[in-house]
Image (cartoon, grey):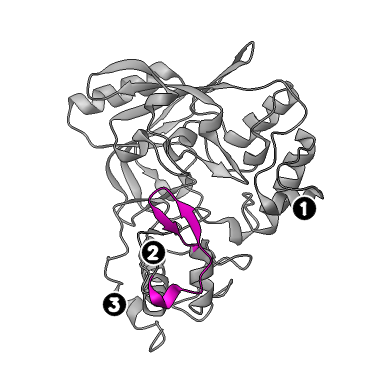
Amino acid sequence: MRKSLAELTTMRVGGDAADYVMADTTDELVGAVRTADASDVPVLIVGGGSNLVIGDGGFDGLVVHVKTRGVRIDGDDVCVEAGEDWDPFVATALQEGFGGLEPLSGVPGSVGGTPIQNVGAYGALVSQFLTAVTVYDRQTSEIREIPAADCGFGSHRQSIFKASDRYVVLRVQFTLPRTTTSRPLAYAGLAERLGVKVGDVAPTQLVRDTVLVMRRERGMVLDAEDHDTWSVGSFFINPVLPAVPDKARDCPTYPDVAGTKLPAAWLIHQAGFAPGYGADWGRGRVRLSSKHALAVTNRGGATTAELMAFAAHIREGVERAFDVRLGPECDLVNCSFDDPAPDWLQDLIPTGG
């Protein structure tokens, strides 16, 4: 069956899938992928769709929508099926007396997506608690368990799962401490909001509640009525450079194993693109979030072509200002920053903008 992919992504853009199946069980998930692979049919795995932008032409293959469910607790080990929604799982873990995941409250998407991105927020990374990932290996046609040490986790957004489409995540295993007190807080803004110092601890439920408030203030908790959340969260990745260009010498910097990290939001804002920018660009259907400059948002009725042209416009402005070329943090399927803008859109772009 055909399926509108805009319905499956938080950005709410994209064409149709040539074929679509919803996998409610692990057997259905593995079976769908195995059958498609045997017939050389392209496969796109979709979970929560919170980090995915799909082109207006859709996907000429099989889209497998992962909706598997189940949370199993064995002592301090918690095994979660890939299709479980992430934030409800975090809430369940707290209710069961487990701590550690509370800084990751409010992150959209599914549990299966978290090891792919090595999701991180407010000083915590999924990889700090993850012990193993069960996958379907499309190369060997086998189900196997990959221990955390072999998952290639580095910093935020790094894993072996992100680097290729070889593995389909089936379930994720965590080892969580039974506690109502958080780990030492590593994120200064969160510590300040809680009225404590970096390195201090706080009640886990209070940390969760505070993180949710902070994320809502930035439009980072999904809300169908708030177009600032019609996005993939941070659209541009923080660039890591071997050397900081002279034009960017005033930019805040952070050490990274690969060089020096620069905050993309600062670069975007200082290049002249303030939160809310885009009302006079094109048809005004794609803009930066009114709450922060790092999220590109669909204000309703946008196409992927508009989105890509707008993102390219932001990238070019930052590069002119700072000699830094931004890249996407999200996954792009059948679309690119380098796609030419449609003629009708070029006619609507202000001269020089």
Ranked by sequence position, the earlier of labels 3 and 1 is 1
Q: Earlier in the sequence, mark 1 or mark 2?
A: 1
Residues shaded magenta:
245-263
Residue 198 visible in the snapshot? yes
Q: Nearer the viewer, residue 247 or 208?
A: 247
Q: Is residue 161 above or below residue 13?
A: above
**Label 2 amino acid?**
Leu
* For marks 2 and 3 on the same chain, the one whose residue lies earlier in the sequence: 2
What is the C-alpha distance between the residues marked 1 and 2?
30 Å
Residue 176 is situated, as x and y percent measured from the top left of the image, at 63, 22
Amino acid type of the residue tagged 1 in the rendering: Arg
- Under circle 3, the secondary element is helix
Q: Residue drawn at (73%, 40%), measured in percent from left and top? A: 208
Q: Residue at x 22, y 24 (%)?
A: 139
Give yes or no for residue 248 being in the magenta stretch. Answer: yes
Residues under labels 2 and 3: Cα distance?
25 Å
> Which numbered tag is attached to residue 326?
2
Picture coordinates of residue 262, whole percent (x, y): 47, 62
Q: Nearer the viewer, residue 93 or 185?
A: 185
Q: Is residue 217 above or below residue 90?
A: below
Q: Residues within 10 Å of mark 2 (few under 14, many from 20)?
A: many
Residue kind at label 3, given as amino acid type: Asp
Q: Which residue is mark 1?
A: 193
Find residue 97 and report its image quarter. top right
